[in-house]
Image: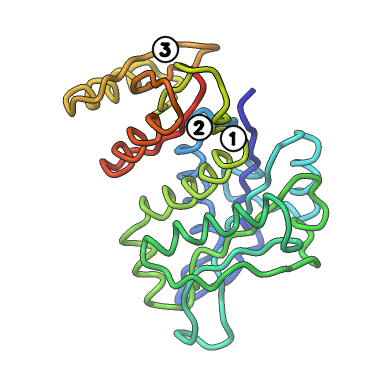
Amino acid sequence: MPYSIMLDAGHGGRDPGAVYNGRQEKDDTLALTLAVGEILQGRGIDVLYTRTTDIYESPYQKAMEANEAGADFFISIHRNSSPEPDTYSGVESLIFNRSGIKLEMAEDINEQLESVGFVNLGVKERPGLVVLRRTDMPAVLVEAGFINSDTDNQLFDNNFGDIALAIAEGILDTLQLNGDVPDASASPGSYTVQAGAFRNSLYAERLMQELLEQDFPAVISQDGGIYRVTVGTFPSLDEAAVTEKRLKRAGYQTVVVSS
């Protein structure tokens, strides 16, 4: 079964979050959350949202929604703020405590955002935050730059797609390390590299043709309404990893899976 992730766009409705020169945190978080969700859905992740429009729900309500849905992970997306503008810049992720898969995911997300150009301010414990304390599943709150930093806002606006991809890739990297990558002792000939998963066959066909033009032996398979684009069949995990690295260098987001 695919992982399910509850994505939370911070604030909303009557709660604008941090505000700077007319810019409202709730708008940035909603746009970024929807973009991240679209990428994750394209990779076969079941994505749920606490909100997809400008509405208000309390942090407690959001946590309860995730619990009732039985989501595997909870990711809350925010913008940071400081008392004085242009004093701080960078990204940080907040977790209940520094343990388990949530710490790995927070670190992976930060590293990916650092590659976009943000300063990496690290992972911090915030056990008092309701969305981290009351959720039953691993939860991470991502502060995607300071909303009252002109440097961070320019980076956010000019590299929006890359930022969404970085957050999604950080999540996927963690999932890959914690169960999606098959065990090295698995039977020979059971590895392939997934380059995309779509509900729309046209998108899958487009990606397959794009990969074939670059001499990647891509094929499409269909299972449960999901069209998966995979590359190659390999007798060992190491050989699959070589192709995966080639695909990543070419700009594709990949996962090694059992074929």
Q: Can you identify the residue that label 1 sits on?
A: 47
Q: Residue at x 45, y 44 (%)?
A: 35
Q: Residue at x 49, y 82 (%)?
A: 88
Q: Secondary structure at mark 3?
A: strand
Q: Secondary structure at mark 2?
A: helix
Which badge, 2 or 1, comes first in the chain's sequence?
A: 2
Q: Residue at x 70, y 52 (%)?
A: 139
Q: Quadrant of residue 189?
A: top left
Closer to us: 60 or 138: 138
Q: For the residues marked 3 and 2, what is the alpha-carbon distance in whole angstroms?
A: 17 Å
Residues under numbered marks 3 and 2 in contact, where contact means CB atoms less than 8 Å apart: no
Q: Is residue 67 left or right of 251 when viewed as pictured?
A: right
Bin the neighbour count of mark 1 within 10 Å (Cα to Cα): few under 14, some 14-19, many 20 and up. many
Q: Residue at x 56, y 76 (%)?
A: 81
Query: Residue 41 got which mark?
Result: 2
Bin the neighbour count of mark 2 within 10 Å (Cα to Cα): few under 14, some 14-19, many 20 and up. some
Residues under numbered marks 2 and 1 in contact, where contact means CB atoms less than 8 Å apart: yes
Query: Residue 221 got which mark?
Result: 3
Which badge, 3 or 2, comes first in the chain's sequence?
A: 2
Query: Residue 212 got which mark?
Result: none
